[in-house]
Image (cartoon, helix red, strand yellow):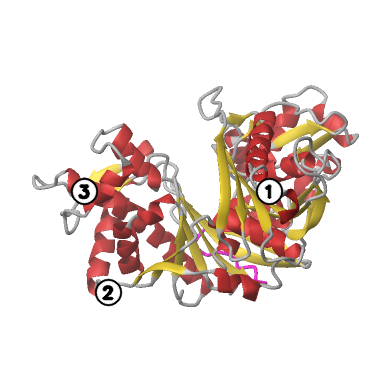
Amino acid sequence: MKKESLILALDQGTTSSRAILFDHEGQPVQQAQQEFSQNFPRPGWVEHDPEEIWNSQLEVMREVLGTRNEAAVEAIGITNQRETTLVWERESGQPLGPAIVWQDRRTAAHCRKMKEDGLADLFRERTGLILDPYFSGTKLAWILDHHEGARDRARRGELLFGTVDTWLLWKLPGGRVHATDASNASRTLMMNIGSGVWDDELLEILDIPKAMLPEIRNSSEVLGKTQAEGIPAGIPVSGMAGDQQAALFGQACFTPGMVKNTYGTGCFTLVQTGAKRIESRSRLLTTVAWKINDQTEYALEGSVFVAGAVIQWLRDELKLIETASECDELAATVKDSNGAYLVPAFTGLGAPHWDPQARGIVAGLSRGVNRAHLCRAALESIAFQSADLITAMGNDMDQPLRELRVDGGASRSGILLQFQADLLQLPVIRPECVETTALGAAYLAGLAVGYWDSREEIARNWREDRRFDPEKSPDETENNRKGWAKALKRCRNWEDA
């Protein structure tokens, strides 16, 4: 392929759809973004309109393609909010109802019942996941339960299931392709993570007809070609991965033991484990990283529920700051948090603690603690939670981690990243291009059509923006982590107190 041509990445997220054009050096040259509606019909329910998802993605595609010569776009890659669940009619392409978003908790009782029935270990062994409403399987079962005749229609092949990647792939070639990639399929509670196929026993337990499930394909291969109205026809759609796996690929984490952490509203940390599927001893998730040339590679994943959201809390609820950047500025005026620890367990604790009954606290307050100290404690809370998770990953890997590659909005904070490096006693490295999720989708698409020849060529595109080496001694770090552990202990099981 000509190096002056471009790859288009579609980054369909939870609150917005984006389209970004990347050049051969992996640099973004044009992008557009459009937000769409968030619907909360009942407490704990979160829904999206599937047509609004598609229309917003279509609009940003048209916007960026309109700025470039159509012939210059060699391929399209898709990355997406994972686990969000859609059902539509095969014949008409009309959605059966709203998409149930990954955040939605309506199937908590279903998951609890399956645990009581002793099914947790089976699902863990087959899928690498825990029984939780987070994943797609129980969401799909709920849709079939709550639309009259839906299950029978699904058995007859009249209804189709997909996560957002499958929905976009259905729409782009004009309803000709019903497929997903292995990384997205691994987040459904329905795919056997060892064999890479839909698991008949799990489908029977969930009462989901196999006829409605998409074909599981490689993350990097030509899946179809564009036929949708308003965009150029014939562009190969040739890359697809869930957002966190795409970010791992975009960070060029191609060797087992390489780790990336995305500092967003929450934190998502993945360590690449190669062809080896590691069963976590720390209650982390085993997931497919990607499948290329019919070879599956795996990752361990853990999530911090509240990361950048704690800064929004300081701004919107406590009114301690007016902008997110002000938190960083105030935190820089003090050398530490003056003994204060903020545990932002607003919705419980994620990996490796998994305590849904925990609630947020501020511990260690003294008369001398001011708002600058609280801002610093908030930033440090993000690093503490990530350190707990990354330490658990290192223990599961049975090998020392060498460095941490970071991205996401909060990775702009030098204070946060320096504190992270000190806690982990590891280099923390921020790349020049922090659009790693979209970039990963672009790389997967470009590999499939020969735009990039190899992962080695892609890895040479990765360039360091700033490196944070540990500055504190291990003893100082250990004292910090002991204080955090005390605060963490006091917030546990709060709802049962």
* SS at mark 1 in the image: loop
* SS at mark 2 in the image: helix
Label 1 vs label 2: CA separation? 40 Å
In this picture, is 165 found above or below 42? below
Q: Position of residue 271 (x, y in %)?
A: 54, 66
Disc 1 or 3, which lies upstream in sequence? 1
Q: Residues within 10 Å of mark 1 (few under 14, many from 20)?
A: many
Q: What amino acid does circle 2 point to?
A: Pro
Is 197 left, or right, of 373 in this rendering?
A: right
Residue visible at 35% across and 57% down in the picture: 383
Residues shaded magenta = 274-283
Q: Which mark is residue 490?
A: none
Residue visible at 68% across and 42% down in the picture: 164
Residue visible at 72% across and 59% down in the picture: 219
Please name the predominant secondary structure of the magenta segment in the image: loop
Residue at the spot of label 2: 474
Membership of 279 in magenta stretch: yes
Q: What amino acid does circle 3 point to?
A: Leu
Residue at the spot of label 1: 189
* SS at mark 3 in the image: helix
Membership of 325 in magenta stretch: no
Q: Position of residue 114 (x, y in %)?
A: 64, 42
Which residue occupies the extreme right position in the image? Answer: 156
Q: Position of residue 289 (x, y in %)?
A: 64, 62
The answer to whether residue 122 is seen in the rendering is no
The answer to whether residue 461 is seen in the rendering is yes
Q: Nearer the viewer, mark 3 or mark 2?
A: 3
Residue at the spot of label 3: 330
